[in-house]
Image: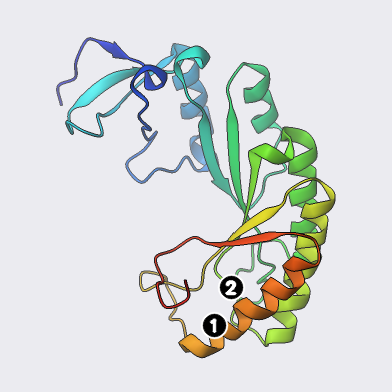
Amino acid sequence: MSKSSKLLSGRELGFPYSFSRWTDVPIDKWAWFEELLKTREMVAYHPEQWVPYRWSLRPDDTLGLVFWTKDPTNVMWAKLQERGYKIKVHVTVTGWKEEEGKAPDHWQGGMNLAMAADLLGPQNVIWRFSPVPILPHQVIVERFEYIMVQAAERGIDHVYLSFLQENDRMPETRDVQDRLNILVELAQVAQSRNFKIYLCNEDRLLA
């Protein structure tokens, strides 16, 4: 694969670019990711030309680094901040332990979210309640409220929410009315803390 010899700047061009084809850097690739940061450059496709270019990874050329995780407690995020990078960490916390055995329950997940906000600043932590667990309404609301309280007490004021999508490994079994009812119940809980709920998918029926 050919690549341009010119080193491009994401900040100058205003483009996002991905560290991997599927936009993820799993923990077992962290050494590879650190090596990229040491060399201060990477190869990625230009989002308009679809041609590989060399992109600068210097902090002053980088708009920011965005991560998505279920475990935000690793101090590696803070170390990147100390090196001058702007960090945004999307944290998925639903407490759906019944289905996602390795994910934290709502108690631990709420504490993890609070710890991340303390470590990185609440403006740099985005909570995702996604997907909404397939559980009785009251259980969903109770778990959501516990996590929300932990987040709100640390300065986080919104959450991105989605139900199961067609490409998920299990189907969404709730009809539109049932999902709307859940949204209303969660919105009533959120209102008590001036907490905002945003849909993070293209489900126009729910919007």
Numbered disc 1: secondary structure: helix
Instruction: Name the residue tied to disc 2.
Output: 132
- Say if 130 sits above or below 88 in the image: below
Residue 155, which numbered label?
A: none
Q: At 68% from the left edge and 45% from the top edge, which residue is drawn?
A: 72
Indicate the quadrant containing the N terminus: top left, top right, bottom left or bottom right: top left
The reply to whether residue 184 is visible in this rendering is: yes
- Say if 8 sits above or below 190 in the image: above
Q: Looking at numbered disc 1 in the image, what kind of residue is underneath it?
A: Arg
| Residue 192: x %, y % from top left | 81, 67
Q: Is residue 16 left or right of residue 125?
A: left
Q: Nearer the viewer, residue 7 or 24?
A: 7
Q: Image quarter for residue 21?
A: top left
Q: Looking at numbered disc 2 in the image, what kind of residue is underneath it?
A: Val
Q: Nearer the viewer, residue 87 or 194?
A: 194
Label total for image: 2
Instruction: Name the residue tied to disc 1.
Output: 179
Q: Nearer the viewer, residue 21 or 84?
A: 84
- Crowding at mark 1 (Cα within 10 Å: few <14, some 14-19, many 20+): some
- Crowding at mark 2 (Cα within 10 Å: few <14, some 14-19, many 20+): many
- Say if 40 sits above or below 17 in the image: above
Q: Nearer the viewer, mark 1 or mark 2?
A: 1
| Residue 87: x %, y % from top left | 59, 31
Tags 1 and 2 in contact by the CB under 8 Å rule? yes
| Residue 48: x %, y % from top left | 21, 33
Q: Is residue 44 left or right of residue 151?
A: left
Q: At 69% from the left edge and 28% from the top edge, which residue is drawn?
A: 78
- State the CA–CA distance, disc 1 to disc 2: 9 Å
| Residue 102: x %, y % from top left | 64, 62
